[in-house]
Structure formats: C-alpha cells, structure tokens
C-alpha cells in the first residue's frame, strides 16, 4: 500500500509511534509518505527505501495573526494523496490532524480518500475535553474511516466522553526489540556515574502531567539511603521547577539535566531504574522502552500504565503522588542488584510477549485493509487480523 502519515514531529509518544510505524511498514514493502511540518522525531537520517517526506510549508501573511496550520496541512494532504497516488492517510492525534484529513477528503471531489485516526492520549483526555475543542474533536473522530486508540483505557475514555458513532479499536503501542535492548556496547554509564552508583533516569516532555517534581522528591529520599545519580531527559515547562526543587532538597549536584536526546536507547541501556510518576499516561511508551532495556519501572497506577507494567513483577506502581511508596520501592531496588535484574528481565519478557512489533503491525495492516474496503477501494490479498 501507499500510506500517508501525519503526526506532530516533536518529542512525545505519538511522534515516536508514527515514526517507528512508518519505518517498519516500509521494511514490509509499503510505500510511506510523511506529511508533516518537519522531519518527525526518530525519523532516521539518511535515505531509507520506500520512505518519503513532504514538507508542510507554513505561510506568512500579515492578515493572519496565527498561521492556519490545519488548513495548510489539509491542502498538502490532498495534494500528496493524488500526486503520489496514495491509498489512504493515517493521522496521529485527533486535533487538528483528523480535522485536516476530513477537510482534505472534502476537497477530493467525491474520489475515495480513506483516513485512519489514531488517538494517543491528551488529544482525548485534555485537549478534546476543552469546551472550545469538544465538538470539533468529536467530529474528527466520527468522520474518520476507522479509529484506533493505543490502550484499553484510552478506548474506554473516548467512548465514555465522546460517545462516538463509529467503533474505536484498541491497538497497543509497540517497541522495536532489536533496537531497545540492554548491551554493554550501548551503555555509557561511566559518563554519568561511578560503577558503584545506582543510575536513575526520567524521560518525558516535562509537562505538568508528568509530575517531574515527584521525580526529584522520590530521588532525594532514595539518595539519603543509596549513593545514586539521576538523569533527567527532555525539556518542557516544568524543568525550572524541577531544578528549583533539586536545589531546595540539596540533590542538585546528583542530577544531570540532559535536555532532549536522540539516543534514548543508549541512556536506557545503562540506566538501573526508571522513575515515571506521571499523573496520567494513556499508554506509557517510555516505560515500555525501559522494560525492553531490562530497566525496572517505578510509576503510578493510573491511565494505561497498568496495561504496560505488571506491578510487583516488571515494575512497581503506586497511587498518584505517593512519593513515600515510590521512594521505598526505589530504595529496595537500588540496594538489591539481584532484584533489579529479576524485575528488569521480567519487563523484557513482558515486552517480548505483548508488545513486539510484528503482531501489532499486522493489526494496523488489517485496519488499513478494512478502511479501504469501507470506502470501496480495491485492495490486495491479505489476511484479516482480529483487533479489539
């Protein structure tokens, strides 16, 4: 198939999933066309067979106080769809990408333009529930040919809040197990800590929902018991708050703020424990990537996290804001290398069992074929995979 993919090209789970999905679909023989404002995060450098990038150029016009990205994107989607002979579009994040695809479809003069929308989280739990965005988010969902959500939690939340007219299919995120794995060649622990120190890490976009202040508070309690170092990977609005709390608690010299990093694999491959106390994760892709690298996860029992982390087996989950509980688990893991290894290995097994790319790509391909069928577009032979 020829598939157009649109996503936010920034750091975050939706962009990661879209980029990885496109790369692996291309390896399966599909032709992938990214339609975005810049190269997506994790879009590998260098030429890749069957992968193409179409730049959505923003227009500067004095009348516009804010550039109409959604309208420009819709026009670009329509242009690429017909000039490249695409079979369908796959848009990630409801606002505004599903709306842009709907507008592009409306400009197609009656020619079939199927589009699949994947919901990732805050497009439903935060943005879509804003009064000014609710109706248009619901419209984007209902006008999609098919809709997927990355977790059972998000599927159920979408159905409860928006009461869509079409079914929502759950297709979990996946992790590239050949890329995300533990290995001495990947590990650069000596750059951050001494061999005897325990290396904690946190990876996010530092939005308020990530509760980075809890990351620092948990680490400060662990640091009193165990000599350790914390890597803070990412950038965002609460970074300054995290730095201030680190100074206040006297652990700023034990924390490294690394900003956005391309080599997430290298950082996870040498980490001992991931601190991920997010208030609400619709899935928790960073947790899954840590598990694939045999890193125990300490997080919160909310949203889709219990679908990813089996608490007490592949990590430990606590109520949101339970700094004491998370610190206790951190101290226990930090003091017991054998337990860390056991929990890490269980995480890897769970990632291999439930979140390997192959079966999940099968589900996306099945959705694509069903979307084409719903629009009356001829399709090639292929098996149909049951999706939730």
Image: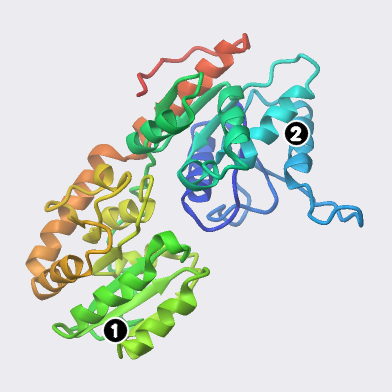
Compare residues 379 and 277 and report the one nearer the observer: 277
Quarter the C terminus occupies: top left
Quarter the N terminus occupies: top right
The correct choice, above or below, for 39 with respect to 268 in the image is: above
- At which x and y percent is residue 272? 23, 69
Q: Looking at the image, tell me whether mark 1 or mark 2 is earlier in sequence order.
A: 2
Task: Report which quarter residue 307 is drawn in.
Answer: top left
Mark 2 secondary-structure assignment = helix
The correct choice, above or below, for 190 with respect to 177 in the image is: below
- Which residue is painted at 33% across and 65% down in the image? 268
Residues marked 1 and 2 touching at CB (< 8 Å): no
Compared across the picture, whether 321 is left or right of 209 comes to left
- At which x and y percent is residue 369? 52, 18
The CA span between labels 1 and 2 is 49 Å
Q: Is residue 33 visible?
A: no
Dot 1, how many residues are within 10 Å of its Cα: few (below 14), some (14-19), or many (20+)?
A: some
Task: Report which quarter residue 22 is drawn in.
Answer: top right
Residue at the extreme right:
62
Mark 1 secondary-structure assignment = loop
Q: Is residue 350 visible?
A: yes
The correct choice, above or below, for 30 with respect to 191 in the image is: above
Dot 2, how many residues are within 10 Å of its Cα: few (below 14), some (14-19), or many (20+)?
A: some
The residue beneath circle 1 is: 193
The correct choice, above or below, for 339 with respect to 69 in the image is: below
Compared across the picture, whether 99 is left or right of 172 comes to right
* Colouring chosen for the image of the structure: rainbow
The residue beneath circle 2 is: 80
Q: How many marks?
A: 2
- Which residue is painted at 33% across and 34% down in the image? 152
- At which x and y percent is residue 321? 27, 63
- At which x and y percent is residue 75? 79, 36
- Which residue is painted at 74% across and 47% down in the image? 69
């Amino acid at each position: 198939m020829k598939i157009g993919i649109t996503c936010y090209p920034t750091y975050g789970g939706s962009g990661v999933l879209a980029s990885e999905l496109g790369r692996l679909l291309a390896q399966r023989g599909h032709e992938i066309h990214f339609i975005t404002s810049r190269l997506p995060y994790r879009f590998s450098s260098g030429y890749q067979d069957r992968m193409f990038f179409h730049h959505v150029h923003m227009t500067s016009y004095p009348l516009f106080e804010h550039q109409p990205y959604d309208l420009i994107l819709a026009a670009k989607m329509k242009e690429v769809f017909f000039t490249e002979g695409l079979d369908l579009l796959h848009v990630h994040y409801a606002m505004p990408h599903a709306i842009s695809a709907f507008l592009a479809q409306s400009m197609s003069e009656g020619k079939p333009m199927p589009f699949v929308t994947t919901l990732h989280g805050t497009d439903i739990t935060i943005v879509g529930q804003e009064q000014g965005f609710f109706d248009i988010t619901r419209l984007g969902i209902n006008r999609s040919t098919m809709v997927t959500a990355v977790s059972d939690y998000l599927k159920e939340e979408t159905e409860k809040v928006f009461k869509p007219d079409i079914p929502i299919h759950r297709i979990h995120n996946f992790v590239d197990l050949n890329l995300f794995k533990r290995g001495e060649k990947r590990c650069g622990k000596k750059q951050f800590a001494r061999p005897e120190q325990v290396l904690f890490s946190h990876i996010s976009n530092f939005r308020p929902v990530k509760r980075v202040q809890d990351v620092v508070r948990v680490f400060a309690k662990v640091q009193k018991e165990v000599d350790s170092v914390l890597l803070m990977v990412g950038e965002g609005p609460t970074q300054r708050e995290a730095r201030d709390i680190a100074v206040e608690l006297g652990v700023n010299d034990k924390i490294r703020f690394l900003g956005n990093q391309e080599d997430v694999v290298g950082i996870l491959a040498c980490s001992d424990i991931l601190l991920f106390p997010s208030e609400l994760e619709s899935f928790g892709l960073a947790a899954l990537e840590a598990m694939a690298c045999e890193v125990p996860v300490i997080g919160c029992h909310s949203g889709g996290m219990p679908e990813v982390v089996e608490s007490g087996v592949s990590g430990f989950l606590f109520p949101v804001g339970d700094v004491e509980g998370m610190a206790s688990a951190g101290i226990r893991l930090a003091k017991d290398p054998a337990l860390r290894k056991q929990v890490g290995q269980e995480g890897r097994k769970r990632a291999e069992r439930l979140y390997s790319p192959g079966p999940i790509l099968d589900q996306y391909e099945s959705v694509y074929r069903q979307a084409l069928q719903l629009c009356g577009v001829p399709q090639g032979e292929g098996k149909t995979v049951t999706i939730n």
